[in-house]
Image (cartoon, rainbow, N blue to C red):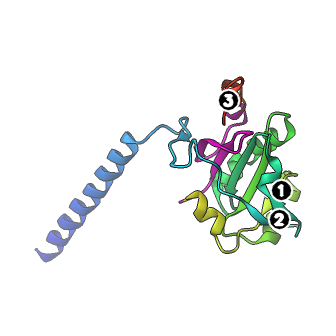
Amino acid sequence: MKGSRIALISAVVVGVIVLLLVIVLATRDPAADRVTRSPLISKPAPPIAGRTIEGQPFDLSRYEGEWVVVNFFATWCGPCKQEHPELVKLAQGDVTNVVSVVFQDDPGTVKAFLKEHGGHWPVINDPTGKITLEYGVPKIPESYLIAPDGTVVAKFISGIEANAVTKLISSFSGRAHR
């Protein structure tokens, strides 16, 4: 009798958990809708200054007048690995610059990853998490599109698509950002 009662309670608990998971998955935005709201939209991008994983000084302000995608990633993150070819496409194009911020990862591991998978853009080490905190990044991958005037115009979660970024930039053509 005692064993069957424990089994019944366990089955109810598992059933409730599965039901909650189904509700969460059914009510969340589809994966294709990766542009999302952020308190940073329409505000100046938080500054990014520090050292790249190569030891070079970096300051985001040197990109004033240009479009920039700021990407937060780590080599241990599966979705980050999946989005990486899209970042490579963006970096190879002539529409935007790519800057990555390392999220809780070893710079040596990141260097090896980039050597194997490509990626010749500044990669900023953020050992204290200060940059990540200033952008309010709860999980990765997460990216921000910064307009030539330094204003954040979009936030992308769960990966970025090069064509979507290029189209978004085109939609801002002719608009004043200041």
The residue type indicated by label 3 comes to Ala
Examine the rendered structure and indicate whether residue 127 appears above or below residue 62: below
Examine the rendered structure and indicate whether residue 56 appears above or below residue 70: below
Q: Residue at x 55, y 35 (%)?
A: 32
In which quadrant of the rendered view does residue 102 lie? bottom right
Circle 1 or circle 3, nearest the eye: 3
Answer with mark 1 or mark 2, whichever residue precedes in sequence. 2
- Whether residue 164 appears in magenta in the rendering, the answer is yes
How far across and how far down the image is residue 173, in percent?
71, 25
Answer with mark 1 or mark 3, whichever residue precedes in sequence. 1
User: What stretch of residues is rendered in magenta?
Assistant: 138-165
Mark 1 packing: few (<14 Cα in 10 Å), some, or many (20+)? some
Image quarter hosting the C terminus: top right
User: 56 or 30: which is nearer to us?
Assistant: 56
Tell whether label 2 touches label 1 (CB within 8 Å): yes
Pointer 3 residue:
176
Q: Residue at x 67, y 42 (%)?
A: 145
Mark 3 packing: few (<14 Cα in 10 Å), some, or many (20+)? few
Q: Tell me if 49 is positioned left or right of 168 in this view.
A: right
Mark 2 packing: few (<14 Cα in 10 Å), some, or many (20+)? many
Pointer 1 residue:
122
Q: Dot 1: what SS?
A: loop
How far across and how far down the image is residue 172, in percent?
67, 27
Image quarter hosting the N terminus: bottom left
Pointer 2 residue:
52
Label 3, label 2: how many angstroms apart (C-alpha)? 31 Å
- Whether residue 75 appears in magenta in the rendering, the answer is no
Examine the rendered structure and indicate whether residue 169 appears above or below residue 117: above
Label 1, label 2: how many angstroms apart (C-alpha)? 6 Å
